[in-house]
Amino acid sequence: MTGAYSEGPPQDLIELGRIVSAYGVRGWIKIQPHSSQAEVLLQTSDWWLKAPVPQIGGAGAFAPPRKAKVLASRPHSATVVASLDLAPDRNAAEALKGHTIWVSRAQFPPEDPDEYYWVDLIGCVLYGHDSDGSPALIGKVVNVSDNGVHAVLHVARAQLEADGSLTLLQNQKGRHIETLVPFVRAHVHTVDIAGKRLDSDWPVDF
């Protein structure tokens, strides 16, 4: 049966976008990707859809993600449009509005040399240099955005504790103190995804 839960969702799902509307009259949907790396949506054939609101009578619980087979997809301006097996007509497509789209990280296409998926950069620890040029901790990458020219790392300032753990610094309002660092080779010269470490020439006190 289409959309059945016989296969449980993978444990490595990554949220990549949100369905914003139906598209056309044949059951297609329009998706707003969460980043400029929409090619993952275009190159994977299995998506998992999560409802935007709790299920009726579910005591606040959300329905399990539904697996959707991508029958066709293509870019459309800044969005992606697609045909899914879960939406055979426009009414079914409209019912999917607001659902978020998730893809297993294991299904991502291989990266090109010197290219990285943003999701893999989040959680990496960024090092720069202090006033005398010595390597020094800046903080942990908590988000990545696109300024239209290149990716930008949102780095939560942190301090290294005696036991080797990191403590993220906060301002008086309890929010992370962030530094924005351009993710370009001129500044970030070493990327170790497996070790979750980035090394840069960015000054710690910038």
Image (cartoon, helix red, strand yellow):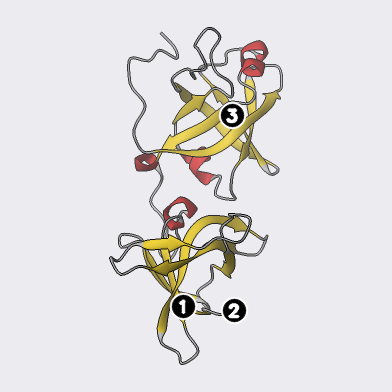
- In the structure shown, which secondary structural element does the residue marked by tag 2 occupy? loop
Q: What residue type is labelled 1?
A: Gly
- In the structure shown, which secondary structural element does the residue marked by tag 1 occupy? strand
Q: Quadrant of residue 107?
A: top left
Residue at the extreme bottom of the image, as rendered: 132
Q: In which quarter of the image is the C terminus?
A: bottom right
Residue 110 on image: x %, y %:
38, 51
- In the structure shown, which secondary structural element does the residue marked by tag 3 occupy? strand
**Left or right: where does residue 79 sit relative to residue 115?**
right
**Left or right: where does residue 116 sit relative to residue 193?**
right
Q: Residue at x 50, y 12 (%)?
A: 59
Q: In this view, does 27 lie above or below 107?
A: above
Q: What residue type is labelled 2?
A: Phe
Residue 70 on image: x %, y %:
49, 27
Q: Are marks 1 and 2 in contact (CB under 8 Å)?
A: yes
Query: Which numbered disc, 2 or 3, marks the residue closer to the eye?
Result: 2
Residue 26 on image: x %, y %:
66, 16
Q: Are marks 3 and 1 in contact (CB under 8 Å)?
A: no
**First-in-chain label (3 vs 1):** 3
Q: Quadrant of the N terminus?
A: top left
The label number, if any, that marks residue 82 in the structure image: 3
According to the picture, the residue beneath numbered tag 1 turns out to be 128
Q: Residue at x 63, y 26 (%)?
A: 98
Cα gap from disc 2 to disc 3, whole angstroms: 44 Å
Q: In this view, does 38 lie above or below 61?
A: below
| Of residues 155 and 200, the one drawn nearer to the viewer in this rendering | 155
According to the picture, the residue beneath numbered tag 2 turns out to be 206
**First-in-chain label (1 vs 2):** 1
Q: Quadrant of residue 195?
A: bottom left
Q: What residue type is labelled 3?
A: Ala
| Of residues 183 and 143, the one drawn nearer to the viewer in this rendering | 143
